[in-house]
Image (cartoon, rainbow, N blue to C red):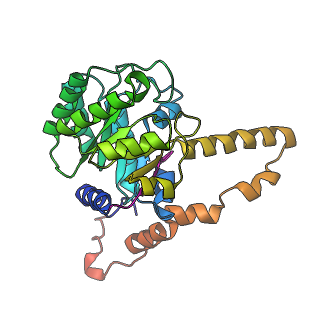
Amino acid sequence: MLHTRTTAAGRRRDLREKLASGRLLRVPGAVNPLSAKLIEDTGYDACYLSGAVLAADLGLPDIGLTTSTELAARAQQFTRVTGLPVLIDADTGFGEPMNAARTVQLMEDAGLAGLHLEDQVNPKRCGHLDGKAVVPREEMARRLRAAADARRDPDFLLMARTDARAVEGLDAAIERARAYVDAGADAVFPEALRDEAEFAAFRDAVDVPLLANMTEFGKSPLLDAATLERLGYNIALYPVTLLRLAMGAVEDGLRTLAADGTQESLLPRMQTRARLYELLGYEQYAAFDSTVFDFTLPPGDRPAPEDS
């Protein structure tokens, strides 16, 4: 109630232990704090906050318009309500190496379990669009070294994302990933791999936890969990799935309401009031309220009557 009972340090250790288990972690991207609670309630391993989802939620394209402080404030809303480890998309670190260092500490303070930084130039763009550009490898390595040096909790996961596959080819992306690990990255996120063979080649070449981005309508095939586990991946990420589902349902609902003049036909597709209240923990809040207010003070604790 009010706040998850877990601590940031505990959630970070939890993520590290899950990654060390060798099994595939399934990590959906949340749309809002309520959906983060639902991700936990349905049994997933961790929760993710996508930069693209945050930008879209603000009515902006995913081109680096959001700021590190906006991201940290939003992240804190998520970590308040879920006991799951939360990973976040920190774009390019929001500037030079010093900015990347500050971003790490902001995200630590927000209670997150980890973040990923990418090697695109700023302003960046969605990883599955054409026309991307990446910074020189050593520049990204400096970004990562600064981030690693700024980290105060060694369990905070620092992941490097490389967008180089679409720009320089697979071999160059693999070489970048190795350099990023040497610079301090704990894990790697190879963006926009083209087929199962490329996922396998990356796994064979890089000896740290790997994330597979299973975003819809992109350049990568939507590999199922069994395939990703067989390939040896550690995280299956579904970053924008819930946003796309929710916005599709909202759009359909608005059209139906406009056409029918009532939402009656939409009721079977809605989350019920009872389910919403269950997810929010209304009963616990009511019990807490009774404990605080529904009692009688003993005579000695009553305030003295005022003088007339």
Q: Please identify the dominant SS of the magenta region.
A: loop
Residue 91, can we see it?
A: no
Residue closer to the observer: 271 or 290: 271
Q: Is residue 287 above or below residue 181?
A: below
- The span picked out in magenta is 22-32
Residue 186 picture location, percent across and down: 24, 45
Q: State the quadrant of the C terminus.
A: bottom left
The residue drawn where x is 26% and y is 20% is 136
Quadrant holding the N terminus:
bottom left
Can residue 30 be found in the magenta stretch?
A: yes
Horizontal side of residue 216 vs 205, given as left or right? right
Residue 169 placement (x, y as % from top left): 39, 26
Task: Report whether 229 appears left or right of 157.
Answer: right
Foreground of the two, 137 or 126: 137
Q: Residue at x 39, y 51 (%)?
A: 233
The spot of residue 250 in percent (x, y) is 68, 42
Q: Quadrant of residue 17?
A: bottom left
